């Protein structure tokens, strides 16, 4: 999962992209980059990218000297492959076709496509594991030497969509000053667009993974890019949208459950409201099972809204008894079991007086590997909890994600092939309650949903997925050995 943003028609576009990216930092912390269309000089594009947090990659000098221009795109990286390889940082550009892109998602048939493109004479220099580079080269290939106009770009995107298998939201810029974006035919990864009036009184456009990145910059949200749809904004500000190849509507359920900022909106649904609904629906199940507790405790930060809903619905006190050290990064996107365990220990501190002697209903957004949950349960017990009941607003994750979320192999998933009782035993809890898949659908109310990691049924073909998984496991093994 990564964060992408593109803006056009704005003086100092890179600075807006930087501010927008800061609001997408939660989507990836491995590195960041900004690409602008140069206004002068011999280079077509200006590009700066680097490893680490966004504020460490860019400085005032970046905007005063290098990243000039009215059209810009930015990317913040969450690596699922080649985490330590700086060659994988985005955006990428192709000087010959004059297009540059940033991508969020994963291409399942990346190796097949790269072989096909290589056989067609396309060079990958340096040779990287990047599926985003494959998208770029494919687009450039399908553009076939034509000028990057809306018509030609749409045609290239449509042809590419018929060859790409997987999840992708892409933002791009071109040598004519155009800004474009598109979303995979199943709408797995999100892409939203907004408008505002620039200093010359003209309507300008921007695209981003989440609405918070645009509303923070003063844009009004105009809508989501639909599954299989593309948008093109010319240098003079004309906007065109077109559905090119739509197959289903299957947005990733994990965006609403965990990944997105709570202030964001997807498909006109507030993430906050969705998480609140997840809590209300889960409370119905808790009630039906006859489970009682003295207090509801959220695991900060993402589960707070659901925990409030559960406390209200069950008429129980809500107590924030686990306090997060805000300077420690999200544990989910760290590599390696030991690194994650250490991060959790540093991240959460209990308020013992609020826990001791109580039956605590601890609410988390999801239980993936179980590392966080097991440590929290241990913390609660050390703090004197009489009972620890763990509730997850996400159903049991039992299958790999081939679309960009890092829960790759089944043996790493604590809930794989287990009953709730078995998961409780593994985690050391008195009881574990998961959201049901029906409950998830009811709360998200989106009309369509990717639930591949819950059911094993995916919106696309995933038969090539094992090549990619093998590479990821190889990467992870290398990293764990180094740590
Ligand atoms: S498999 Fe799961 S995590 Fe991956 S895109 Fe689908 S719902 Fe999201």
Image: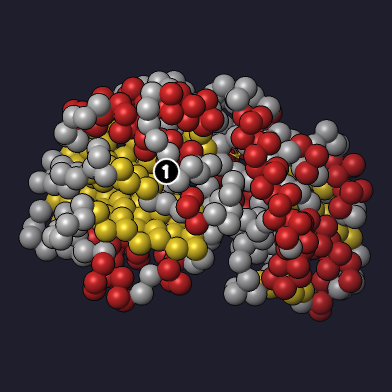
Look at 66% across and 29% down and name the residue there: 466
- Residue situated in front as seen by the camera: 214 or 64: 64
Work out whether residue 1 can be spotted.
yes
Image quarter where the C terminus lies is bottom right
Q: How is the image coloured?
A: secondary structure
Give the left or right position of residue 249, taking residue 435 as reference. Answer: left
Residue nearest the viewer, comparing 293 with 474 = 474
The one nearer the camera, 175 or 410, is 175
The quarter of the rendering in which ligand 1 is drawn is: top right
Q: Is residue 11 left or right of residue 67?
A: left
Instruction: Say if residue 218 shows up in the picture.
Output: no
Q: Residue at x 86, y 44 (%)?
A: 423
Crowd rating for badge 1 (residues with CA inside 10 Å; few <14, some 14–19, many 20+): few
Does 446 sit above or below residue 254? above
Q: Position of residue 266 (x, y in %)?
A: 43, 44
Identify which residue, 440 or 125, lies in the foreground: 125
- Counting from the top left corner in percent of width and height, residue 195 is at 23, 50
For the point 49% across and 60% down, the residue is: 31
Residue 242 vertical placement versus 220 (above, below): above
Relative to 244, 82 lies left or right: right
**Residue 292, image x and y in percent?**
83, 53
In this view, the residue farthest toward the left is 200
User: Residue at (18%, 29%) from the top-left corner?
Assistant: 146
Q: Which residue is mark 1?
A: 125
Above or below: residue 214 compared with residue 207: below
Q: Secondary structure at mark 1?
A: loop
The number of numbered discs placed on residues in the rendered structure image is 1
Splitting the image into 4 quarters, where does residue 144 fall? top left
């Amino acid at each position: 999962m990564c964060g992408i943003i593109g803006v056009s028609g704005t003086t100092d576009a890179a600075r807006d992209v930087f501010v927008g990216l800061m609001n997408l930092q939660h989507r990836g912390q491995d590195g960041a980059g900004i690409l602008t269309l140069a206004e002068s000089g011999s280079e077509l594009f200006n590009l700066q990218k680097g490893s680490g947090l966004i504020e460490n990659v860019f400085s005032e000098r970046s905007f005063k000297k290098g990243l000039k221009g009215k059209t810009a795109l930015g990317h913040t990286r969450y690596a699922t492959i080649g985490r330590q390889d700086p060659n994988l940082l985005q955006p990428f550009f192709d000087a010959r076709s004059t297009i540059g892109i940033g991508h969020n998602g994963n291409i399942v048939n990346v190796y097949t496509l790269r072989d096909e493109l290589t056989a067609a004479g396309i060079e990958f220099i340096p040779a990287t594991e990047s599926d985003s580079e494959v998208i770029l080269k494919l687009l450039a290939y399908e553009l076939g030497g034509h000028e990057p106009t809306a018509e030609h770009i749409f045609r290239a995107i449509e042809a590419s969509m018929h060859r790409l298998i997987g999840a992708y939201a892409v933002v791009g810029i071109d040598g004519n000053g155009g800004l474009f974006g598109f979303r995979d035919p199943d709408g797995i990864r999100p892409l939203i667009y907004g408008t505002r009036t620039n200093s010359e009184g003209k309507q300008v456009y921007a695209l981003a993974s989440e609405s918070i990145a645009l509303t923070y910059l003063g844009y009004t949200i105009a809508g989501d890019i639909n599954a299989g749809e593309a948008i093109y904004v010319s240098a003079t500000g004309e906007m065109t949208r077109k559905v090119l190849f739509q197959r289903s509507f299957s947005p990733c359920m994990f965006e609403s459950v965990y990944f997105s900022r709570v202030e964001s909106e997807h498909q006109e649904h507030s993430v906050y409201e969705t998480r609140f609904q997840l809590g209300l629906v889960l409370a119905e199940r808790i009630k039906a099972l006859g489970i009682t507790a003295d207090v509801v405790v959220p695991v900060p930060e993402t589960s707070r809204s659901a925990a409030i809903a559960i406390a209200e619905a069950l008429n129980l006190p809500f107590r924030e008894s686990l306090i997060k050290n805000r300077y420690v990064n999200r544990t989910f996107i760290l590599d390696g079991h030991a690194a994650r365990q250490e991060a959790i220990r540093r991240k959460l501190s209990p308020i013992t007086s609020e826990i001791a002697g109580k039956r605590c209903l601890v609410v988390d957004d999801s239980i993936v590997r179980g590392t966080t949950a097991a440590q929290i349960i241990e913390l609660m017990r050390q703090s004197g909890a009489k009972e620890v009941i763990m509730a997850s607003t996400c159903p049991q994750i039992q299958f790999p994600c081939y679309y960009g979320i890092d829960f790759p192999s089944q043996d790493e998933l604590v809930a794989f092939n287990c009953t709730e009782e078995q998961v409780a035993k593994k985690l050391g809890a008195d009881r574990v309650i998961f959201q049901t898949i029906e409950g998830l659908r009811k709360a998200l109310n989106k009309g369509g949903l990717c639930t591949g990691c819950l059911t094993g049924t995916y919106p696309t073909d995933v038969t090539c997925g094992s090549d990619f998984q093998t590479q990821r496991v190889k990467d992870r093994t290398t990293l764990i050995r180094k740590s």
